[in-house]
Image (cartoon, rainbow, N blue to C red):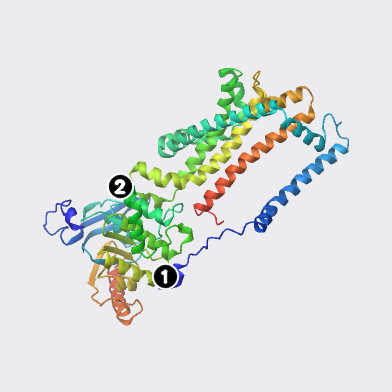
């Protein structure tokens, strides 16, 4: 994955993106003009994500984390600064956003088709991807015949079908019940490891971030206020004492940063 | 692995056993309709028996239904049906193409929407029969006058179906298309137009109703020698005071309209169910 894409990006700094780095966000500002005036969503955000790294971005609603994700996924352009990617970025939405008139298979296949994979190769590739997310045998169901957790797994398969190993996830588990969410943590962790994915995972749930991520990035008021490598051994359990303690510590830091920002 | 994740929320109903189940379902669907038809026929017969109008002006259902039966045996009737249906098909077909293209253009191009969006809705509310004097002036008493009015009657509904369908495509689908790398054409082909299909089919259903009404108005006004049609049959039956033939033809017009509407409605229901817009 890194080989062919390194050439796409010519940075001023040799270590910008490429051999080891998947994403390089440098000095990014983003402002929107609304009816109420100009809103500054991001101020001077710097963020590097290494290839194969799982980074969680945590912050309160309106802290700019979703805006950052839109920029990383190339859905929007920064007002200032730069976003460099070692490859295209697939995006997993909060609700699965599967097309309801297509079966699970056809939803995954559409991603292959739109990137020009020949028809003869698509069926086998869809089978492979559905097997990766353990949905073999349910491909012919339509989204309204799948549970919320299954829909998100189809969405994950569709991300993988985009032929990139960099995936941005926008609170993908926010709408699921606790049991299904725990189960999907295992699945996402497993798939990310097996497929050597680079994941930028946005959430407002600190324990979820500590459960999943190699590194947690805290955002408040449109700035990155703290970064911390998690370093706990895997597999982690969301309700374990280590995860809870680490999450509580990070939450306290985020609160403090929020107070400073407000003062 | 928790089993609830692997169990679909909605079980697909396995096809009900054929035979008794299907028969009961058919009966459940049919009896309210049969009852309604019976009530209408009964009320009609009661009015006839009351002597409000002589029977040669208002014949009873038995006489009219036997006329329908006789009519079904005459080649002239089938030629009339063929003429009327071919006009309906051609008019609706042209309206389909015109309305769909117009709808896509108006939905897509903002100045065009500002210019003609309200006009399309205005045309939809305009009784199509009021176009006939102009159509006859423009084209004469011929097929083209009828076609013109049928298309004007149906196209605005179809265009409005397309516009409202495209307007109501969830914004998330637009983001999805961009993330999947779809260009504008692919975005329309694979995402926007399929997403707009339920509203489009509603527009088609309404367009058909308007086409059929416009066609009947046209066939009453524009009678072409040597071209028997259902509308012309109505007009001749009135001129020759053949009340049973008049009512029999009206029944046929009603039944054809209902049959075609039934086809559109069942297609619309299937699509809505498949698009997850209604549980079925």
Residue to which mark 1 is pinned: A180
Q: Is residue A230 left or right of residue A207?
A: left
**SS category of the residue bearing label 1:** helix
Q: Which residue is disc 2 drawn over?
A: A116
Task: Characterize the local packing of mark 2: few (<14), some (14-19) or many (20 or more) Cα atoms within 10 angstroms.
Answer: few
Image spot of residue A184 (x, y percent): 37, 69
Q: In the picture, which quadrant includes the N terminus of chain B? A: bottom left
Which dot, 2 or 1, sits closer to the camera?
2
Does residue A174 appear anywhere in the picture?
yes
In depth, the one of B39 and A55 nearer the eye is: B39
Left-right relation of A176 to A37: right
Where does residue B104 sit, x and y in percent of width and height? 44, 38
* Spot occupied by residue A105 in the image (x, y as percentages of width and height): 40, 56
For residue B36, the mark is none
**Residue projecting furthest to the bottom:** A241
Which residue occupies 27% across, 58% down? Answer: A42
Callout 1: residue from which chain?
A
**Closest to the observer, B247 or A232:** B247
Q: Residue at x 61, y 41 (%)?
A: B261
Specify whether disc 2 shares its chain with disc 1.
yes
Q: Which of disc 1 and disc 2 is earlier in sequence? A: 2
Disc 2 to disc 1, how far (Cα)? 34 Å
Residue B36, image x, y percentages: 74, 47
Q: Residues within 10 Å of mark 1 (few under 14, many from 20)?
A: many
Residue B148: image quadrant is: top right
Chain to which mark 2 belongs: A
- Considering the numbered disc 2 on the image, is that residue within a helix, a strand or a loop? loop
- Residue B178 to residue A175: above or below: above
């Amino acid at each position: 994955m890194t080989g062919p894409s390194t050439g796409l990006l010519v940075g001023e700094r040799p270590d910008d993106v490429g051999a080891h780095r998947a994403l390089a966000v440098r000095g990014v500002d983003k402002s929107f003009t609304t009816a109420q005036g100009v809103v500054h969503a991001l101020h001077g955000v710097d963020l590097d994500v290494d290839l194969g790294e799982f980074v969680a971005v945590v912050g309160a609603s309106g802290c700019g984390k979703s805006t950052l994700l839109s920029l990383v996924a190339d859905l929007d352009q920064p007002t200032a600064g730069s976003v460099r990617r070692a490859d295209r970025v697939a995006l997993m939405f909060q609700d699965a956003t599967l097309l309801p008139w297509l079966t699970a298979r056809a939803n995954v296949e559409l991603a292959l088709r739109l990137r020009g994979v020949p028809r003869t190769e698509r069926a086998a590739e869809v089978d492979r991807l559905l097997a990766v997310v353990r949905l073999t045998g349910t491909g012919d169901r339509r989204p309204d015949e799948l549970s919320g957790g299954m829909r998100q797994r189809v969405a994950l398969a569709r991300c993988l079908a985009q032929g990139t190993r960099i995936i941005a996830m926008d609170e993908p588990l926010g709408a699921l019940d606790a049991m299904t969410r725990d189960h999907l943590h295992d699945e996402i962790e497993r798939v990310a490891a097996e497929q050597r994915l680079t994941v930028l995972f946005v959430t407002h749930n600190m324990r979820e971030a500590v459960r999943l991520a190699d590194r947690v990035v805290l955002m408040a008021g449109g700035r990155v206020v703290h970064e911390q490598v998690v370093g706990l051994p895997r597999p982690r359990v969301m309700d374990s004492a280590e995860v809870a303690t680490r999450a509580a510590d990070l939450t306290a830091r985020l609160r403090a940063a929020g107070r400073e920002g407000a003062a | 692995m928790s089993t609830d994740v692997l169990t679909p929320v909605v079980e697909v109903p396995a096809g009900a056993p054929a035979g008794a189940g299907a028969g009961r379902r058919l009966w459940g669907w049919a009896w309210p309709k049969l009852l309604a038809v019976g009530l209408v026929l009964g009320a009609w017969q009661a009015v006839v028996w009351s002597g409000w109008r002589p029977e040669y002006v208002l014949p009873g259902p038995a006489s009219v239904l036997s006329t329908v039966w006789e009519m079904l045996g005459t080649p002239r009737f089938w030629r009339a049906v063929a003429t009327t249906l071919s006009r309906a098909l051609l008019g609706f077909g042209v309206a389909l193409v015109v309305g769909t293209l117009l709808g896509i253009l108006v939905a897509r191009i903002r100045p065009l929407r500002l210019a003609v969006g309200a006009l399309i809705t205005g045309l939809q509310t305009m009784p199509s029969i009021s176009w006939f004097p102009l159509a006859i002036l423009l084209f004469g008493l011929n097929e083209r006058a009828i076609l013109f009015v049928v298309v004007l009657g149906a196209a605005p509904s179809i265009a409005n179906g397309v516009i409202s369908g495209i307007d109501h495509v969830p914004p998330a689908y637009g983001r999805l298309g961009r993330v999947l790398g779809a260009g504008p054409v692919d975005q329309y082909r694979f995402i926007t137009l399929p997403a707009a299909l339920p509203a489009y089919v509603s527009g088609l259903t309404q367009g058909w109703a308007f086409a059929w009404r416009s066609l009947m108005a046209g066939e009453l006004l524009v009678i072409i020698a040597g071209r028997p049609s259902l509308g012309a049959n109505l007009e001749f039956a009135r001129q020759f005071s053949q009340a049973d033939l008049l009512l029999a033809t009206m029944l046929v017009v009603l039944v054809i309209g209902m049959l075609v509407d039934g086809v559109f409605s069942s297609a619309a229901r299937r699509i809505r169910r498949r698009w997850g817009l209604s549980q079925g």
